[in-house]
Amino acid sequence: MHLDNTDLQLLALIQSNDSISTEAMAQQVGLSKTPCWRRIQRLEKSGYIKRHVALLDAEKLELGVSVFVQVKTNQHDANWATEFAQVVSQFPEVVEFYRMAGEYDYLLRVLVKDIPAYDQFYKRLISATALTDVTSNFAMEQIKWTTELPLPQLTKAE
Amino acid sequence: MHLDNTDLQLLALIQSNDSISTEAMAQQVGLSKTPCWRRIQRLEKSGYIKRHVALLDAEKLELGVSVFVQVKTNQHDANWATEFAQVVSQFPEVVEFYRMAGEYDYLLRVLVKDIPAYDQFYKRLISATALTDVTSNFAMEQIKWTTELPLPQLTKAE
DNA sequence: ACCCTTAAGAAATATTATTCCCATACAAAT
DNA sequence: ATTTGTATGGGAATAATATTTCTTAAGGGT
C-alpha cells in the first residue's frame, strides 16, 4: 500500500495530537473532512495506526523512576527464550523489553516509584526467572521521551 | 488532589484504549456518562492525563530498528549539560533520552530504518556534539513496548 | 433540623463522526 | 474521440457522541 504526502502529514499530526477533530485535521492538510476521514480509516484498517491511547503523567502517578536492566544468560535454546519472554512480559512494571545484540542478551526498562519499589520488583524478577547476571542502571532524569516516530520528511512534489 | 478507585480505573482504561466513548467507559466503571465525563475532564485539567495520541506501526513505517546509545563524557558543568540536552533532543530519531547514574552518563534510544541509517545518524550526532565515548547497542527484537503505566492495583474498599 | 459541599444522573443541546450521493480527473480500451 | 473503470474529492444529510444545564441525593458540621 502506498502512502502519499497527505497520508504522512496525517500520520504526523495524529501521532502528535489525537484530540483534534477530523475537520480541523482536514484543514491542516488541505482537504475537506470526508476524504480526510476516509484516509484515516484506511490508515487504521491497514495497520499504520495501531491504537489510540492517552499518555499519563508518570511523575504525578508516582512512577518517576526508570531503571534499565541488562541481562546476560547462558541459556540459549528457543524454548527457554520463549518462556523467558513470556514471564518477563507479564510484569506491568516492564514497559520495554528487547533482545539485544552484543554485550548483554536482554534489556528492560522498568518503571517504578522509587528505589525500594525497584528492589521489590528485582526480587520478584529474580525468583520468577532464576537469572544470575543482571545489572541495573538507574536513570536520574528523563530528558526526552516521545511516542512520535521520526517520519520521513515530506517531499515537495510527488 | 485525591484519586479514588474510579479515577484509577478510568486512567487504566484510557491509557489502554482511547477510542472508546465516554458512555462505554462509564458503563465499565459503573457510572453514567456525565460524571464519567467530568472525571476525565478533571484528570486532564489536573495533568494526570497529559495528551491523547495515536500510536503508529514502526515496522510498517520502516522504523523497526532501535539502537541504545550509551554516552560517557568528562564534561560535567551545567551549561554544557543544558546545551547537550538541547542539541540531542532536537533529533527526531532520538525517542528516549536519559541522564544516568553509574557506568555511563547518558542513554539514548534511537529509532532508525536500518544499520546504514543508524550510521548516518551517528555521524550527525558526533559532529553536532563532539562526543568521543559512545557505545551503540542494537536491539534484535522488541519483545514488549507499552505506554501503559503500571498503575497501583485497585483497592477493594476505600 | 439546617446549611454547605460534593458527586451523581436525566434530559437538552451542540459538536463531531459517519454515511450517502454526486462530481471530477485520469488512464486504459475500443 | 468516446467510453468505461477506478480513484479521489466534496456537500449535505444523518447518526453518534460530547458537553451543558438543571435537578437530586448523600454526608459533615453547626
Image (cartoon, coloured by chain):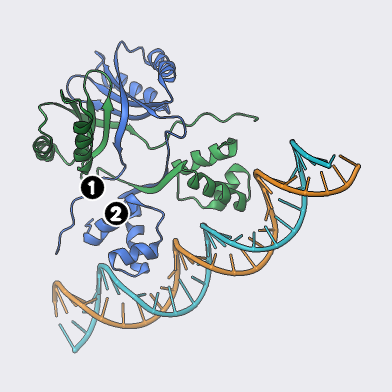
Chain colours: A green, B blue, C cyan, D orange
Disc 2 with disc 1 on a shared chain? no
When the figure is inspected, residue A52 is found, relative to residue B83, above or below; the finding is below
Label 2 Cα crowd, 10 Å radius (few <14 / some 14-19 / many 20+): many
Three-letter code, disc 2:
Leu
CA separation in Å, label 2 and label 1: 10 Å
Residue tagged 1 = A61
Compared across the picture, whether D4 is left or right of A83 comes to: right
Disc 2 is attached to a residue of which chain? B
Q: Nearer the viewer, residue B27 or A131?
A: A131
Asked if the residue under mark 1 is in contact with the one under mark 2, i.e. CB atoms within 8 Å, the reply is: yes
Write down the residue under mark 2: B11
Foreground pick, D12 / B42? D12
Is residue A46 or residue A25 the one in the foreground?
Answer: A46
| SS for dot 2 | helix
Q: Quadrant of the C terminus of chain B?
A: bottom left
Residue at image x 36%, y 52%? B17
Q: Residue at x 47, y 33 (%)?
A: B61
Question: In the rendered image, which quarter contains the N terminus of chain B?
Answer: bottom left
Which amino acid type is shown beneath numbered disc 1? Leu
